[in-house]
Amino acid sequence: MHRYSNSVKIKKLFKQKFIILFATTFSGIFFNNFAEATVLNDGYKEVIDHVWQIIYRDFVDSSGKFDKSNWIEIRKEFLSKKYSNSNQAYDAIRNMLLNLEDPYTRFLDPKEFNQMRIDTSGELTGVGIQITKEKESDFLLIVSPIEGTPAYDAGIRAEDKILSIDDISTQGMNIEDAVKLIRGQRGTEVKLEILRGSKSFFKVLLREKIEIKSVMSKVNQTKNGYLIGYIRIKQFNANASKETRDAIEDLETKKVLGYVLDLRGNPGGLLESSIDISRQFINSGIIVSTLSKDGLKEIKRGNGQALTNKPLVVLVDEGSASASEIVSGAIKDNKRGKLVGKKTFGKGLVQSMRTLVDGSGLTVTVAKYLTPNGTDINKSGIVPDIVVKMNINPILPNEIGTRRDNQYRVAEKELINLIKRNNEISQFDPSNQNLDAFLKSNKDNNMVFSLD
């Protein structure tokens, strides 16, 4: 009866608000109507009070230090002051939130909030280039064009320099301002002056919707000829689930014998994306459970539609956080695969994003999540089955996921062991006379089986 009551409460909560959760280093989006805010005479105070109300109503304190009576006094203090511009109000909000001692509950000005929406949506409007600053010349340097984008099709290359954008010199220009000039409305044009070697030329590019690829995959062949599917997920954005599904389906046609899933350096992303991707590897069992402020527990499980049951090893490190920990925790606790690398970041809290009246936003901690075994990994992280350090000397980006990559090399070795074990089990016939030889062989390989 209690379980049914909690389920009804959760359904009512979801009916009241349109919710998109995400689990990153600040996870989850709740798009909320500003009508809930108290209407004050001062527009700047209106934003401050809206933030205050959200915290008072929904904040989940993982430290146990949050005092509602003290928070009421803080409201009086901040609303008693005068604010002459938005920057003063924004600074006041940031100072107010410091009292929570929660690094994940934070205020985002309109520019920061818009950037976060772009990052998690998995798409933007532009020409498809990644840029950085060249220290020696202070010019903007193209890291690489994204395949299939206007920049790529126009022949833009890595290490080209951008001298001007729409006849505005980029000398001394910061990356943020350059991005603002390059991005724009779909279907409009932007003119770039490019320096390649000693020659400069102009390229007029048409802005298009650009999908941000968060997943890459390939087939690696081991020394003994095994084909291994390697999938690296950089972020759990809105496209990650479909991209991972496409990658698995493609690798399955190539007859790979197992998978290495690389989540190193992945800070997280959309909660639903992490659940969907977990379900692509886990057929049944609990994926993750979340606990709200009111103690309501929601459990997500496998849906019987896994795309593969082949042996799996997951690469993690100290940069694998939140949504990455949901996937790796689900795989470890369900004994679906082995974890290799370093202990994960340890971020077991779920945030929501609230849109404020002026286009700014607030990420607020609203729940915590537990791994399938009920483990709260916040601040403690997940310890891999096999702990391995990364290369002492840094490797090149194109060497990640190769045998030059120390952690990958160990993961590949472990996967080969899992593949061999899987093959031996599938080939074993208990009615055959080779039982004693089979058991002896696997005893020698430090393998333990339970035969009922």
Image (cartoon, rainbow, N blue to C red):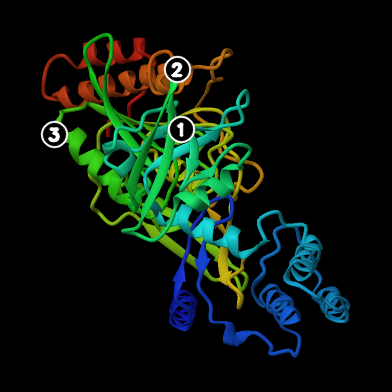
Q: Is residue 371 visible?
A: no
Q: Callout 2, which amino acid?
A: Asp
Residue annotated with mark 3:
253
* Mark linked to residue 371: none
Q: Callout 3, which amino acid?
A: Thr
Residue annotated with mark 1:
142
Q: Which comes sooner in the sequence, label 2 or label 1?
A: 1
- Classify residue 108 as left or right of residue 2: right
* Camera-side residue of 79 and 233: 79
The picture places residue 238, in percent across and down from the top left corner, at 38, 55
Q: Callout 1, which amino acid?
A: Ile
The answer for how far apart the CA atoms under marks 2 and 1 are is 26 Å
The picture places residue 339, in percent across and down from the top left corner, at 45, 31
Q: For mark 1, does the 10 Å Cα neighbourhood hold few (<14), some (14 to 19), or many (20 or more) residues? A: many
Q: For mark 2, does the 10 Å Cα neighbourhood hold few (<14), some (14 to 19), or many (20 or more) residues? A: some
Residue annotated with mark 2:
405
